[in-house]
Each structure stands twice: as C-alpha cells, then as structure tokens.
C-alpha cells in the first residue's frame, strides 16, 4: 500500500505533536501520487547493482594501507519513477555513504548505478560527463544549519544552482526563486534575508527549495527531519509528500526512525553494517518483518496505547555493532541475533525474494515467526 494511503492512520502511531495532515492535495479526489506511482511502477529510474564503498585504513610514516572500513558492502536496489524508497538503519550502517556515492559526491569503490531512460551508468562517467545528470539528481542535507552558507541571502542560495547551470537569468531567475520559495511555504519577502533569521524548519524549507531549483527527477533526502523539533517534523513530511505529487518526484528517504520512514515510503530497505538485510513495501515490513534485525528496530518504536506497550515484547540486542573494518564471518548480524545458528556463523546469507516484492537476507526467514506491530 502506498504512503499516501497510510496517512489516514498515522495519527494513531505518532505523538500528538507529530500529526500528519490528512487533507488531500487535489479537490477532485484523485490521489495523483498513487496514480503516478502505479502508472510508472515498472519504469526504473535508478538501478543500483553491488555498490561498495571501502575507506582505506592507513598507518605508519609512509601511510601504508593496512585494511579497509567497509562502509557500504555490496548493496543492490532500484527506485521506480514516482516512488519513495526508505533507507533505514542505525547510525553507522552506511545509509548516508550510499546516498553520497549515488550523487558522486564521494567515489564508489565498485558497483554500478544505472539512471534514467538512457540507462547510463553514472559510476563510469567522468566529471564533465556527469554534469548534465547532476541537474536531475539532487540532495536534501540532514543539518539545515550547516548546509546553508550564512553569508548568502536566501535568493543567492536558491538561485545559485540556476546561475551555475545557466538555466535562468535576470527577471526570469528572480521569478523562479519566488516560485520556489512559495512552493515550500515561504514568502517572497524572505528572499533578501539570511539563514540566521530563520528557524530550523524554515531553513530546511530553503534547502528543499534549492534542491528543486533544477527540476530534478530524483532527490536523496538524507535524514531531512532528524535535526528538527518533533512539532516541525510533520510539516516537512507533509511538504515532501505534496512536492512529490506536484512534481512527480522520486525520493530516496534516508532515516533511522522506522516509524517516519514507514509512513512516507512506498518501499523500505533496511541496512545493517553496510549491507541490505530486507526490502519490502512499507506496510508489509511494519506488520510482518522477515529479518530479526528489522523485528528489533520495530520493537523500539513506541506504541501510543500504554496497555499494548506494556504487553509488548521488547527486544534488546546484545553487544555492540561489529567493527566494519573487521566484520564477523557469515551473517554480519549473527553475534547479536537471538535466532542465530552455526549456519549463520559460517555462511553469508544472500538477499533473496521470499514472497513477491519482499527480499530478505536470512537463512531462517522461512521458519521464523517475527513480531510486527
């Protein structure tokens, strides 16, 4: 079920200060986001194959490489046109690194990411060849304070991508800046102000306007609400949902809060120690997880009903996240998994489809009965 359908029951799962608007964007009753997603369901906008990013560990006077930190260790997924794919996992699992690799902000160690109707492998493009595709893939950064230049006005910040790419100039540029600001809920008068004059939520809106400036097809949203107050998070989530409908955008929504990801995403990919351990549509993953790590993440999401919360089994993972420079043998999760067997310690499970649309990397997913919500 699509994220737009799930907005009707989000209020029963989130605090009263984080209420998602249930008002339809279109008066004629047509849910445009759902229509566009279903229409483009088999049209892959991005296909990532075996993406890896290893950071070298260097020691000694001559800085010799003695090992590697495997931040992203062979992940594969795709994003359909008009779809929101949630990428979730605890801190340090490689979510942000994967997003930065896709935008070529940092070079990938290996792998391919095929983009657009042209089926171009962005990983093989030179810096100059990559330029036209940077207009089509943009990023919303996590920290709205650090991602905006304090010496530039809002007009300069939002207009910079268009000036650099020479898409607008003069009066047309000013009109476009006003249009972008109004589309994210800011006023035209705000364009002459500096970032310090705005709240955290307003700064994030400025960052969103900048990401929309070049009319992208795909936006990588790197934890766009994690640095905001709870009361402001719902406003940004509503805004992202409306912009998706208005501009037929696709999102890769990176977050560590599984409840937020479930409500804004069509599908969710769960990462652990640089690997994807489960991919499923959001509702199925939330109600019927297939991987023990996903079950543990869901159990950490509080329920609004105190009685249900007390009766619920709380799963506490033992130990710490393993060192990504020296990952365990077999399944990376087995040192913390209460269902682990000798097979898990010896053999690395492959990501396989267990039911249509559901993929999981677990040897025992067929026999486990895991707890959802």
Image (cartoon, rainbow, N blue to C red):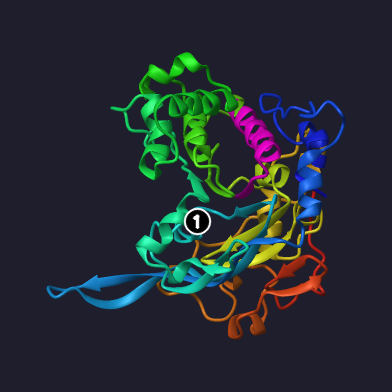
Residue beneath the point at 44% across and 29% down: 173
Q: Is residue 244 magenta?
A: yes
Q: Nearer the viewer, residue 90 or 133?
A: 133
Residue beneath the point at 71% across and 47% down: 262
| Residue indicated by mark 1 | 99
Q: Nearer the viewer, residue 245 or 309?
A: 245
- Residue at the far top: name it: 189
In x, y percent, where is residue 199? Answer: 46, 21
Look at the numbered disc 1 and give the secondary structure of its residue: helix
- Residue 342 visible? The answer is yes
Q: Up-down: is 80 above or below 3?
A: below
Q: Nearer the viewer, residue 16 or 181?
A: 181
In x, y percent, where is residue 88? Answer: 60, 54
Q: Up-down: is 233 above or below 50?
A: above
- Residue at the far right: name it: 29
Q: Is residue 73 left or right of residue 352?
A: left
Q: Is residue 346 magenta?
A: no
Say which quarter of the image contains residue 149.
Answer: top left
Q: Main secondary structure of the magenta part?
A: helix
Q: Up-down: is 179 above or below 299?
A: above
Q: Is residue 141 left or right of residue 221?
A: left
- Residue at the far left: name it: 61
Total numbered labels placed on residues in the image? 1
- Residue 283 visible? The answer is no
Q: Is residue 363 left or right of residue 373?
A: left
User: Magenta segment, which residues?
Assistant: 232-253
Q: Up-down: is 325 above or below 373?
A: below
Residue beneath the point at 61% across and 49% down: 251
In x, y percent, where is residue 316? Answer: 63, 55
In x, y percent, where is residue 113? Answer: 54, 67
């Amino acid at each position: 079920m699509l994220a737009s359908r799930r907005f009707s029951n989000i209020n029963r799962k989130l605090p009263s200060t984080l209420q998602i608007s249930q008002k339809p964007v279109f008066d004629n009753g047509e849910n445009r986001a759902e229509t566009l997603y279903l229409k483009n369901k088999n049209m892959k906008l991005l296909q990532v194959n075996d993406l890896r990013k290893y950071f070298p560990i260097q020691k000694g006077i001559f800085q010799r490489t003695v090992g590697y930190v495997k931040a992203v260790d062979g992940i594969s997924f795709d994003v359909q046109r008009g779809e929101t794919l949630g990428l979730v996992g605890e801190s340090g699992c490689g979510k942000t690194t994967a997003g930065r690799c896709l935008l070529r902000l940092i070079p990938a160690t290996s792998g391919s990411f095929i983009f657009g109707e042209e089926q171009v492998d962005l990983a093989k493009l030179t810096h100059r060849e990559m330029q036209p595709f940077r207009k089509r893939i943009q990023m919303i950064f996590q920290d709205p304070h650090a991602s905006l230049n304090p010496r530039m006005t809002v007009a300069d910040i939002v207009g910079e991508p268009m000036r650099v790419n020479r898409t607008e100039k003069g009066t047309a540029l000013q009109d476009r800046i006003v249009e972008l600001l109004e589309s994210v809920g800011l006023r035209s008068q705000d364009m002459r102000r500096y970032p310090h004059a705005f709240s955290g939520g307003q700064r994030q809106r400025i960052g969103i306007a900048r990401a929309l400036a070049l009319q992208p097809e795909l936006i990588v949203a790197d934890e766009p609400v994690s640095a905001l107050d709870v009361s402001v998070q719902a406003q940004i989530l509503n805004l992202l949902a409306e912009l998706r409908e208005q501009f037929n955008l696709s999102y890769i929504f990176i977050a560590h809060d599984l409840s937020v990801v479930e409500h804004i995403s069509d599908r969710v990919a769960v990462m652990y120690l640089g690997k994807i351990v489960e991919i499923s549509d959001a509702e199925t993953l939330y109600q019927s997880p297939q991987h023990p790590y996903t079950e543990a993440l869901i159990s950490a999401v509080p329920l609004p009903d105190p009685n249900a919360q007390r009766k619920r089994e709380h799963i506490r993972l033992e130990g710490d996240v393993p060192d990504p420079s020296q990952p365990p043998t077999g399944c990376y999760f087995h040192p913390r998994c209460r269902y682990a067997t000798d097979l898990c310690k010896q053999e690395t499970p492959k990501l396989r489809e267990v039911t249509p649309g559901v993929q999981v990397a677990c040897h025992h997913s067929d026999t486990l009965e895991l707890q959802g919500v």
